Amino acid sequence: MGIIIGIDVGISTTKIVGLRDRQVISPIRITAADPVTSLYGAFGKYLHDNSISLSDVEQVMVTGVGSSYINEPVYGLPTGKTDEFVADGLGARFESGLTKAIVVSMGTGTSFVQCDGDHIQHIGGIGIGGGTLQGLSRVMLNTRDPEQIQSLAVQGDIHHINLSIGDISNRPLPGLPMDATASLFSKAQYDAPKEDIALGIITLVLQSIGSAAILSALNSGIKDFVLIGNLTLLPQCKEIYPNLEKFYNVRFHIPKYAEFCTAIGAALYYVNGFHP
């Protein structure tokens, strides 16, 4: 089998990965003004950087919201499409090694995909994600630059922004320790430092996603959640999700290639025999 290229096409950002013998080859991400430019720019760079010729590629598989703009073979190669939610499930299952879990795809918004063996089903989502983080940062911090937001956030103090159980009670509540969040942004003042606001925004987004994911699993018996998408790169994930694990007796997993799981899943759709 030749190389299978999986491409997750966003509105402005495209992620691309190759699979050879079920091994992931050097995933990359490209940002451009529109999905078509982004896709072709990513594809050309990927082939160049990995010394791959067109003749080495057996199949191209595209997915994501921007894939609707792709209606012709990419560079003349056999090209198919994969449902984004199926790609989420296949990629997360492959990368995490879990057969039963809920995949939490943190994109512009957030979707939840339940995986139980070969059964992959989209079960819902929330309109909170990277788009929320950028939008609030534009309004409150006058920036949408992820690096600047993170740089501010690492210097922030969340206790100046969020109300905790310890702020409203002199003893823990059933199942909730004193440092659990009682209300997001409740302590924020009009003159709060940008550093505190930046951390508050990131915490609001990540904690809301985690709480919604846990609620999505009620009555399913599922305790494992696989986090995928760009937001998994935020360092605050390493603090917020372990705290939720302790509170609710669940497990959050961030795979090695969490950012590229959807692209990996698109390629796996073909590798697993679901040919377009």
Image (tube, rainbow, N blue to C red):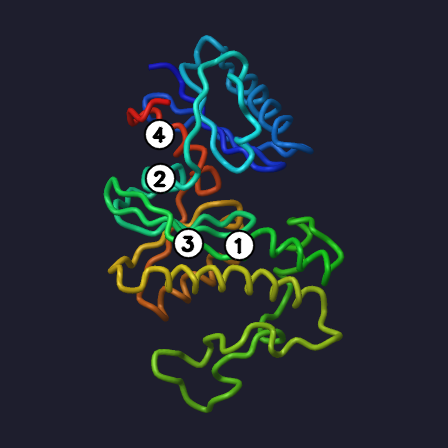
Asked if the residue under mark 4 is in contact with the one under mark 1, i.e. CB atoms within 8 Å, the reply is no
The kind of residue tagged 4 is: Tyr
Tell me if 106 is positioned left or right of 159 in this view.
Answer: left
Q: CA distance from mark 4 to mark 3?
A: 22 Å
Determine which residue is flagged by label 4: 269
Q: Residue at x 37, y 14 (%)?
A: 2
Determine which residue is flagged by label 2: 95
Q: CA distance from mark 3 to mark 1?
A: 26 Å
Looking at this view, name the residue that lies furthest to the top.
55
- Say few, some or many: other residues with alpha carbon within 10 Å of mark 3 (under 14 / 14 to 19 / 20 or more): few
Q: Residue at x 70, y 77 (%)?
A: 189
At which x and y percent is residue 70? 55, 25
Tell me if 32 is positioned left or right of 110 in this view.
Answer: right
Q: CA distance from mark 2 to mark 1?
A: 20 Å
Q: Earlier in the sequence, mark 2 or mark 4?
A: 2
Asked if the residue under mark 1 is in contact with the one under mark 2, i.e. CB atoms within 8 Å, the reply is no
At which x and y percent is residue 146? 64, 49
Of residues 119 and 179, the one nearer the viewer is 119
Task: Examine the image and state in which quarter residue 162 appears.
Answer: bottom right
* Quadrant including the C terminus: top left
Q: CA distance from mark 1 to mark 4?
A: 31 Å
The kind of residue tagged 1 is: Pro
> Which mark lies nearer to you, 2 or 1?
2
The kind of residue tagged 2 is: Glu
Determine which residue is flagged by label 3: 124
Q: Earlier in the sequence, mark 2 or mark 3?
A: 2
Q: CA distance from mark 2 to mark 4?
A: 14 Å
- Which SS class for mark 2? helix
Q: Earlier in the sequence, mark 3 or mark 1?
A: 3
Asked if the residue under mark 3 is in contact with the one under mark 2, i.e. CB atoms within 8 Å, the reply is no
Determine which residue is flagged by label 1: 235
> Which mark lies nearer to you, 3 or 1?
3
